[in-house]
């Protein structure tokens, strides 16, 4: 199946904004369906994305982008499913296929209200080698608690489709508190193998950086800022995996609720049962939600 061509750059110049009380969220549908800013009054919860375009393989470390139809990397861009071998197209300069095709394409605004927006991607078969046509919906809502997101995946092919999904936010927080009971150590390629029991309670920005795959985290985590702001992350059980990433010395912290561990397709094919890999029957729909509860310091409104 031939790969469908992509534009050389993504155009994120058009922005849409939703608001509720002091909370505001801004999106760039054409920039991979990204959340480009999330703020409460003057406080930015994620790194604001000011760029209006960027090359496909050099996206900014800012905002938050969707992960679909899988999360993270696929080893050598190759996997086997249903007895067939599938080759995925990596981006230039990247040895592994990564994050699916969602963040590299423009999304459509299907519904826009003062406090809500639906962003929709209908991807045909063949994009970056993915052989199944599918639809992904990001349904964002703001209310007094904060920002909620429902991710919907629909298999539009006539065959079963393996998949995963999640989000990749670049928070401005310095640390995250959680309780994860399983960790997935990585090899020299940054890909996991067998998981291990663990008790991971806190991770954060550091001189060494961090790229940690976790599961059995209970769908609860709290991000902390030095000035007392907190963000409580609540995720449905479908988001059974969590990636915590920051580059060495960076001023961002990625805390990524996802349905599958990296390289889930190949790990599952090798017999690993905890990958989070899901399969949608033809026409079947998947839906799961999360909440980013935004909490200002006491006395700050």
Image (spheres, helix red, strand yellow):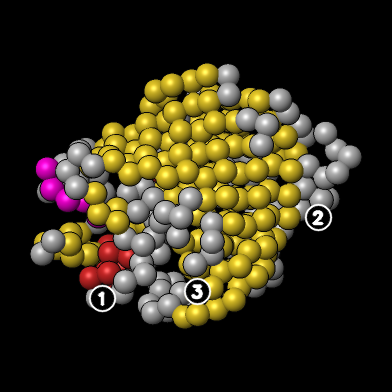
x 67%, y 68%: residue: 202
Q: Secondary structure at mark 2?
A: loop
Range shown magenta: 158-162
The reply to whether residue 55 is in sight is no
Residue with the mark numbered 3: 182
Instruction: Spot the residue most to the top.
Output: 113
Determine whether the residue tagged by mark 1 lies in a helix, strand or loop: loop
Placement of 269 over or under 241, stated as above or below: below
Mark 3 to mark 2 CA distance (whole Å): 28 Å
Q: Is residue 10 above or below residue 256?
A: above
Q: How many marks?
A: 3
Where residue 46 appears, x then y in whole percent?
A: 64, 44
**Which is more foreground, mark 2 or mark 1?**
1
- Quadrant of the rendering where the C terminus is positioned: top right
Q: Residues within 10 Å of mark 1 (few under 14, many from 20)?
A: few
| Nearer the observer, 222 or 35 | 222
Which x, y percent locates residue 198? 55, 78
* Marked residue nearer the N-terminal end (3 or 2): 3
Does 200 sit above or below residue 86?
A: below
The residue at the point 81 percent across, 55 percent down is 226
Element marked by disc 3: strand
- x%, y% of residue 253? 63, 57
The stretch drawn in magenta includes residue 160: yes
Residue drawn at 25 percent across, 75 percent down: 271
Judged left or right of residue 37, residue 54 is left
Of the residues under marks 1 and 3, which one precedes in the sequence? 3
Q: Is residue 2 left or right of residue 181?
A: left
Which residue corresponds to mark 2?
Answer: 226
Q: Main secondary structure of the magenta part?
A: loop
Mark nearer the viewer, 3 or 2: 3
Badge 3 crowding class, 10 Å Cα cut-off, few under 14, some 14 to 19, many 20 or more, is: some
Q: Label 1: which residue?
A: 271
């Amino acid at each position: 199946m031939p790969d469908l061509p992509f534009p050389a750059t993504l155009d994120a110049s058009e922005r849409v904004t939703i608001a509720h009380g002091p909370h505001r969220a801004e999106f760039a549908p054409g920039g991979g369906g990204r959340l480009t800013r999330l703020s409460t009054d003057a406080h930015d919860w994620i790194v604001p994305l000011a760029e209006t375009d960027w090359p496909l393989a050099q996206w900014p470390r800012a905002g938050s982008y969707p992960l679909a139809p899988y999360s993270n990397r696929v080893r050598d861009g190759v996997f086997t499913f249903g007895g067939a071998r599938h080759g995925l197209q990596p981006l230039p300069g990247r040895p592994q296929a990564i994050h699916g095709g969602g963040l590299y394409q423009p999304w459509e605004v299907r519904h826009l209200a003062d406090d809500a927006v639906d962003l929709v991607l209908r991807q045909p078969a063949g994009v970056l080698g993915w052989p199944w046509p599918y639809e992904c919906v990001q349904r964002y809502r703001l209310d007094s608690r904060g920002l909620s997101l429902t991710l919907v995946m629909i298999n539009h092919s006539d065959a079963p489709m393996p998949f995963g999904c999640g989000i990749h936010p670049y928070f401005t927080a310095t640390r995250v508190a959680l309780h994860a009971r399983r960790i997935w150590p990585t090899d020299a390629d940054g890909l996991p193998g067998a998981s291990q029991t663990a008790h991971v309670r806190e991770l954060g920005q550091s001189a060494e950086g961090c790229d940690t795959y976790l599961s059995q985290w209970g769908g609860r985590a709290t991000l902390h800022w030095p000035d007392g702001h907190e963000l409580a992350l609540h995720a449905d059980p479908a988001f059974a995996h969590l990636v915590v990433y920051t580059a060495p010395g960076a001023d961002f912290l990625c805390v990524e609720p996802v349905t599958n561990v990296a390289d889930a397709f190949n790990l599952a094919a090798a017999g690993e049962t905890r990958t989070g890999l899901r399969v949608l029957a033809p026409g079947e729909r998947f839906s799961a939600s999360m909440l980013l509860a935004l909490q200002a310091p006491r006395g700050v409104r």
